[in-house]
Amino acid sequence: MNRRSFLAAGAATLAASATGARLKIRKGVYAGMLPRTLSWADRFKLARDVGFEDVECGTVTEPAAAEEIKKASETSGLRIHSVMNQAHWKFPLSSSDPAVVAESVKGMETSLQNARLWGADTVLLVPAVVNPQTRYQDAWTRSQQHIRKLLPLAQKLKVVIGIENVWNKFLLSPLEMARYVDEFKSPWVRAYLDVGNMVLFGFPQDWIRTLGQRIVKVHFKDFRFQKRQAEFVPLREGEIDWPEVHKALAEAGFTDTATVELPGGDEAYLREVSRRVDLILEGK
């Protein structure tokens, strides 16, 4: 859907339904959605102006860029609440190659230091990737082994490692994810729940109710599967039962940040996304 049709469809597709109590959840936006033609200061200001309260940034390796982002956050009043680690897909912790794992660990260490600098309390981590070279059990064992080595740094910096459910052929049920997190026996490892990533094989409300207090952060995006065509779609236009997600989040007592992770766009587009998040948080 292009920007024009997305905005035009707003009034038609977002008709009011029964209203629930608004969730006490902060509205976050992924920094990659903000116009890259703008300076960091202007990106943060735009996010604040369209209604977001928090931002999630990707890992930054250049000290000058990290400082620029920190200043943009301070000037705009927009809190950086989490860091999306950028190394885990190309360099998974589950690899049998020590050099690959070393790069993955380095990326996580940088992400944790970014979080400390920016005042974020969480780093998102895709813990493992199952593929023809990596069996499921090996992915489980290896990733846990390396995450445990990162725990002293996470504890020192007071930053939680948030394990995300993604399309990595790993942690395919909420029961598995709960067990995986629990086996660390550490408050510094929790679940980063993406409500759109399990729709092909599960229901986000089920995952929320199963994971409960293990959830540290949430990603909002929508998804549908029709005529063998799987695709992520604009918020509230897919298969997710958002009122049920609202109920499940309320039952779980989740009060942290829900971050939209969608394609980027201009001010009008971002304002519409922000409005849709408001409707979700209101139980509509």
Image: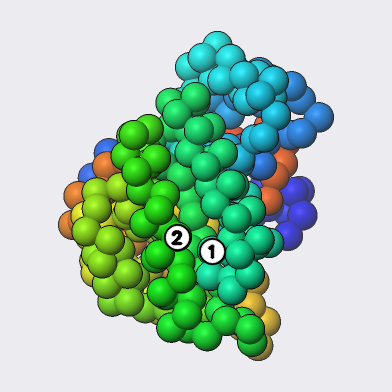
Q: Residue at x 56, y 39 (%)?
A: 110
Q: Residue at x 23, y 45 (%)?
A: 21
Mark before the other along the chain sequence, 2 or 1: 1
Residue designated by label 1: 93
Residue nearest the viewer, comparing 161 with 95: 95
User: x and y percent of residue 112 in the render?
Assistant: 48, 38
Of the 4 image quadrants, the one containing the N terminus is bottom right
Confirm or deny contact between disc 2 and disc 1 (CB under 8 A): yes
Q: Residue at x 54, y 24 (%)?
A: 48
Indicate left or right for 124 with 98 as reference: left
Q: Of the residues shown, which amino acid type is indicated by label 2?
A: His
| Whether residue 201 is visible | no
Q: Is residue 94 above or below residue 38?
A: below
Indicate left or right for 135 with 154 as reference: right
Of the 4 image quadrants, the one containing the C terminus is bottom left
Name the mark on residue 146: 2
Label 2 residue SS: helix
